[in-house]
């Protein structure tokens, strides 16, 4: 296949480029710029704070290709980009940060091409550029961060403006060229050594794969809308009214590395989501259990049921669990997620990825109810070279594609295989990182001989090569 030949060519050329590792875990600090460390010593003058600020940068190359079955359209993308970030030193506890990013489309497939058999466009490659304007090849720069931060201590702070956050439901989802950004007031407080409080109010979001900034209601629906619960085409884009998102999280560190997390996300006029998570560590054994509950607020975003986001007749409950074994080199786990049949689990895909233990890059269980997901994960870190390898395999049992009340996106049951390799260079090439990710998804459900349930969903391979350099 042409895609395989192109992939080999890119890999052979890619050794001279640079990359950044993908798929930052949700519990990790949201440091897009690896040079960002800690609060600099407070200065006695504003001029000193600006002169002793820090500049950090990033250069990035991303190759992605999707190979569909038979005559269905394949796609590939080559994206190159870079960004600069500046943060002042502290002045009486205050800091300012600003950063921007640019992207170039370098000889990719036509992102506007419509498959003649299914009337669909590329699903994965388009999110490397501008999902709001698939024909946009040139105006791809974005103001990433612009904030004012006040530091109460070296760890506790509050920020106002455009910034990065990494929470269970609104997070970086940084598996493309650049992550999701938010605008608002957000703080982190550490009352005592074992407690962390974080949260705030968000009034705008710039989703991954977009260029512009959007109000909260406006941001819901930039990605595909799927179907309403009665099977009609989803029509909530531009029709959701919301004044903002209020979110609050609490983490308590228990003895021997155990932890308890509580989260609540209230989207004014749309829905509310609550989560409790307990992670357990006993010597080399690890386990975790997570419970999530959702319900609509008012009419779920719009009084018209054909234009609403969260149908008031539905609610969702999710139980996710894991058990595994870890040491200095190995991390293994078996994971299970159950979404009940009371309704779809809903969280705008524009805002972040699923927080469940069964999450695997390149697919989600958002938009589905009556789900049973089983995933095994094995990670190995080589001791003599800075190489990490990851293997994941999952079976996702979903409702029938025509069960619209519980299957928003017409995705059949499937199995998924992920193979992920990452290498972090040292010495002369310090700052250079490489990642290669291969994904295969196989159909396990009824598709009624309709290829719209197959293209870019199942019986497909997705190839990724990411090169990144931090300075």
Image (cartoon, rainbow, N blue to C red):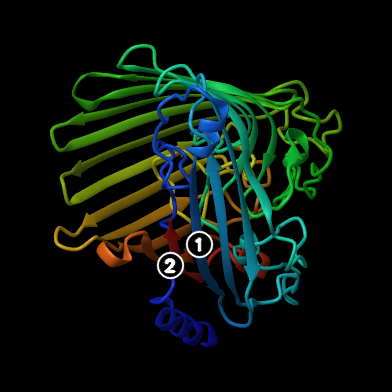
Q: In the structure shown, which secondary structural element does the residue marked by tag 2 occupy?
A: loop
Q: Going from the N terminus, do you reach mark 1 or mark 2 first?
A: 2
How packed is label 1: few (under 14 Cα within 10 Å), some, or many (20 or more)? many
Q: Quadrant of the C terminus?
A: bottom left
x and y, in percent, of residue 300 in the image: 74, 28
Q: Nearer the viewer, residue 96 or 382?
A: 96
Q: Nearer the viewer, residue 99 or 26?
A: 99
x and y, in percent, of residue 448 in the image: 64, 65
Q: Kindly indicate the quadrant of the structure image that contains residue 341.
A: top right
Left or right of 325 in this view: 126: right
Q: In the structure shown, which secondary structural element does the residue marked by tag 1 occupy?
A: strand
Q: Which residue is found at the position 63% from the left and 59% from the top?
A: 102
x and y, in percent, of residue 260 in the image: 35, 21
Q: Which residue is mark 2?
A: 18
Q: Nearer the viewer, residue 355 or 136?
A: 136
Question: Pointers 1 and 2 in contact (CB under 8 A)?
Answer: yes
How packed is label 2: few (under 14 Cα within 10 Å), some, or many (20 or more)? many
């Amino acid at each position: 296949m042409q895609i395989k030949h192109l992939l080999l060519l890119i890999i052979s050329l890619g050794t001279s480029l640079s990359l950044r590792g993908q798929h930052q875990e949700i519990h990790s600090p949201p440091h897009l710029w690896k040079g960002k460390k800690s609060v600099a010593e407070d200065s006695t003058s504003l001029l000193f704070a600006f002169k002793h600020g820090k500049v950090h940068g990033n250069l990035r190359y991303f190759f992605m290709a999707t190979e569909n079955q038979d005559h269905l359209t394949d796609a590939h993308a080559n994206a190159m980009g870079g960004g600069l970030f500046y943060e002042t030193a502290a002045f009486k506890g205050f800091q300012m940060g600003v950063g921007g990013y640019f992207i170039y489309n370098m000889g990719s497939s036509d992102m506007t091409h419509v498959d003649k058999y299914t009337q669909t466009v590329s699903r994965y490659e388009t999110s490397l550029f501008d999902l709001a304007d698939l024909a946009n090849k040139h105006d791809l720069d974005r103001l990433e961060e612009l904030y004012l931060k006040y530091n109460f201590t070296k760890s506790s702070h509050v920020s106002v403006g455009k910034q990065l956050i990494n929470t269970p439901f609104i997070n970086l989802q940084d598996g493309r060229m650049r992550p999701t950004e938010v605008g608002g007031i957000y703080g982190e407080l550490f009352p005592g050594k074992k407690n962390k409080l974080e949260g705030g109010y968000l009034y705008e979001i710039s989703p991954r794969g977009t260029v512009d900034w959007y109000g909260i209601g406006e941001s819901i629906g930039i990605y595909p809308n799927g179907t309403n619960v009665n099977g009609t085409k989803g029509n909530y884009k531009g029709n959701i009214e919301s004044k903002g998102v209020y979110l609050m999280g609490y983490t308590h560190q228990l003895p021997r590395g155990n932890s308890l997390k509580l989260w609540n996300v209230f989207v004014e006029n749309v829905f509310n989501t609550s989560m409790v998570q307990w992670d357990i560590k006993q010597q080399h054994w690890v386990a975790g259990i997570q419970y999530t509950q959702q319900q609509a607020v008012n009419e779920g975003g719009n009084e018209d049921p054909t234009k609403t986001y969260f149908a008031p007749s539905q609610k969702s409950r999710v139980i996710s669990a894991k058990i595994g074994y870890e040491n200095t080199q190995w991390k293994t786990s078996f994971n299970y997620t159950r979404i009940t049949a009371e309704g779809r689990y809903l969280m705008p895909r524009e805002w972040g990825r699923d927080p469940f233990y069964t999450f695997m890059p390149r697919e989600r269980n958002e938009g589905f109810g009556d789900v049973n997901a089983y995933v095994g994960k094995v990670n190995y870190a080589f001791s003599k070279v800075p190489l990490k390898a990851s293997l994941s395999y999952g079976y996702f049992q979903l409702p029938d594609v025509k069960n619209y009340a519980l299957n928003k996106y017409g995705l059949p049951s499937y199995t998924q295989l992920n193979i992920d390799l990452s290498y972090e260079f040292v010495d002369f090439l310090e700052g250079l990182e490489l990642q290669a990710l291969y994904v295969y998804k196989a159909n396990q459900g009824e598709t009624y001989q309709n290829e719209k349930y197959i293209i870019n969903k199942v019986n497909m391979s997705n190839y990724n090569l990411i090169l990144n350099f931090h300075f």
